[in-house]
Image (cartoon, helix red, strand yellow):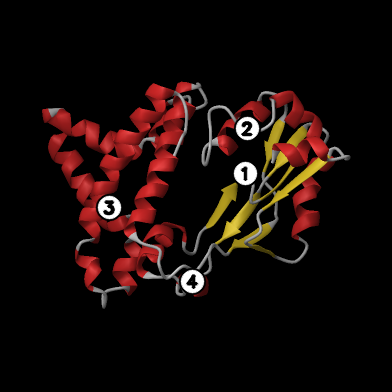
């Protein structure tokens, strides 16, 4: 990202991943908000159609289950537009504290200090790689990356307020509240509910696969992964996985 940004001649920078499909007029719709000079960046909506999800292997379906039939709106580098001047003022993407996750959230936080960050009507389909060898280990690794990044973002002061903290660390909160006797029963109930709802679509459509019986336990295991690596990211202050 940073090499391309520095080399760019114009003031509007569009980042785009190689594994996306643009809907018609996506580029013009992405650029539209930046007609307002106060807006320094605009994001997109990521569509996750069921027909794509159906092509995934069992564990890929588990990983992407929560996104199906949802438009995930935000800025994550997949298809976003930035003002180069604002990027330079923000210090570009942070190469010191982040390696494979978290740099987008850090940048958005810094850009909001400079100007307005907007959504747009641009829509994309993020294909991802249909990988028959995608396993539960890949999900664990992804969770480690995301959680470690969240810990770093907290350490850097990028996550503020009760709502933002709860949204970012709800998995960790579910486990930590087990410590308190007066919240233990409620927390245990919520953990059980979470273990099914997190991959609800897989339970609804993947009942023919025997691995579905261990899926609730696996989802609970991911809670512990989140807690450990969030703490690690917070303590060390770097996302390294």
User: Upstream in the sequence, badge 3 or badge 4?
Assistant: 4
Q: Tags 4 and 1 in contact by the CB under 8 Å rule?
A: no
Residue position for label 4: 50
Residue 138: x %, y % from top left:
39, 55
| Label ID, residue 107 | 2
Q: In this rendered view, identify the residue nearer to me: 177 or 135.
A: 135
Tell me the CA gap for discs 3 and 4.
Answer: 22 Å
Residue position for label 1: 75
As drawn, 97 above or below 218: above
Q: Tags 1 and 2 in contact by the CB under 8 Å rule?
A: yes
Relative to 75, is 131 on the left or the right? left
Relative to 51, is 109 on the left or the right? right
As drawn, 63 above or below 175: below
- Residue displayed at 46% across by 58% down: 67
Tell me the CA gap for discs 2 and 3.
Answer: 30 Å
Callout 1 secondary element: loop
């Amino acid at each position: 990202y940073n090499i391309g940004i520095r080399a760019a001649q114009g003031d509007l920078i569009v980042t785009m991943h190689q594994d996306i499909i643009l809907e018609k007029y996506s580029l013009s719709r992405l650029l539209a908000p930046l007609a307002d000079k106060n807006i320094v960046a605009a994001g997109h909506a990521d569509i996750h159609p069921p027909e794509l999800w159906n092509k995934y292997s069992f564990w890929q379906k588990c990983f992407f289950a929560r996104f199906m039939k949802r438009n995930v709106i935000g800025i994550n580098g997949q298809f976003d537009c930035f003002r180069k001047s604002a990027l330079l003022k923000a210090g570009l993407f942070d190469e010191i504290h982040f390696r494979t996750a978290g740099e987008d959230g850090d940048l958005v936080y810094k850009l909001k200090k400079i100007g307005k960050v907007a959504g747009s009507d641009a829509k994309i389909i993020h294909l991802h790689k249909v990988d028959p060898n995608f396993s539960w280990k890949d999900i664990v690794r992804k969770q480690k990356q995301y959680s470690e990044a969240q810990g770093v973002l907290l350490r850097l002061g990028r996550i503020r307020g009760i709502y933002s903290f709860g949204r970012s660390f709800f998995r960790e909160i579910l486990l930590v509240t087990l410590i308190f006797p007066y919240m233990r029963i409620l927390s245990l109930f919520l953990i059980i509910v979470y273990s099914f709802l997190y991959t609800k679509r897989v339970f609804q459509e993947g009942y023919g696969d025997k691995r579905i019986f261990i899926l609730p336990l696996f989802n609970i295991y991911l809670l512990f992964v989140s807690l450990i690596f969030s703490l690690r990211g917070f303590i060390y202050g770097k996302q390294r996985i």
